Image (tube, rainbow, N blue to C red):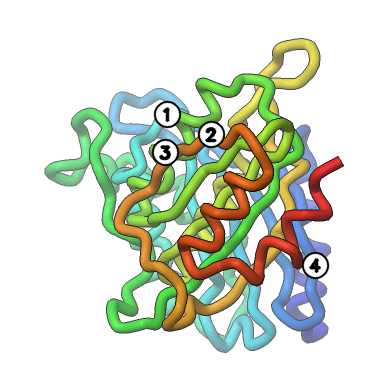
Amino acid sequence: MAGPAQEELAALEAIFCGPGEWEVLSRSESDGPVLRILTKAEGPTGADIPVDLVFHLPLSYPSCPPGVSVSSERLTRAQCVAVRDELLEQARSLLSEPMIHRLVLWVQQNLRHILAQPGLGGGPGKCPAASTAGDEEPWMTLLHLDHMRAKDRYVKTVLRWASDLGLTGRLMFMGKVILILLQGHRDTLKEYLVLQKTSKVDVDASGKKCREKMVSVLCDAKVQPEHTRFRAFEVKEFASLDELRKEFETAGLGTLFPEFVLGLVK
């Protein structure tokens, strides 16, 4: 990450210094940092709406726009997608200069106008997949979750995210092993992972809503010709390790099982 971008991160950390306002989710020398900013913006009724903004700053930033994900417990996914699309359009007009703070200010000033657009003021609705590269080769991600305390709520949330983002695959349970296998465009899979890590999807030991901090990416790769292309996202329970192995083998993913799954079984 270039010097100006590092300076921008330091400035943002100083600006967003309130409780829970700022968090660096990951730092990667090969892919750039991912940061989260929690802000509030006035909605159409005049009430403040909390908005979670996640920015991925690629190595070529700010010569190219950042990756953006928008989420809020007060907004539908369709509304979040509309805000994100407007933010990306704004980012393209600010290339070659630090822009994250300006983008946050823009959301604060314009959220009510975006939500007032026709078709965005109703109830929950499906949103289009985040990727605009319709001909992009499909990608596959295998995730491992350490546990689910609020299982019913967690499963419903994962199903909703997969549906909203147009992802297919499996949520698999075998004893204490919990796996999520996703297929879709790579950018959409990245957006799913951001939602997984930043949304309050589970509860802690005291029953308080909390973000998922114990998800790990076991595999992230292109879908190969021998792999099954899932047509839907399904939840499956397996009674034995052999049943789980057969599920991977049937999907043409038999090589993933010994490499990534067997070591999870205690």
Above/below status of 78 relative to 75: below
Is 99 placed above or below 261 here?
below
Q: Position of residue 263 (x, y in %)?
A: 83, 54
Q: Is residue 221 visible?
A: yes
Q: Quadrant of residue 96?
A: bottom right
Check disc 3 and report the residue beneath it: 159
Q: Nearer the viewer, mark 3 or mark 1?
A: 3
Q: Name the residue that disc number 1 marks.
A: 74
Gap between marks 1 and 2 measured at Cα: 32 Å
Residue 237 horizontal/vertical position (percent) = 53, 34
The mark that comes first in sequence, 3 or 1, is 1
In the picture as drawn, the residue positioned furthest to the left comes out as 118
- Residue at the spot 51% in from the left edge and 22% down from the top edge: 153
Residues at circles 4 and 2 in contact by the CB criterion of under 8 Å: no
The outermost residue toward the right is 266
Identify the residue at image location x=42%, y=78%: 92
Mark 1 vs 2, N-terminal side: 1
Residues under numbered marks 1 and 2 in contact, where contact means CB atoms less than 8 Å apart: no
Q: Residue at x 41, y 75 (%)?
A: 138
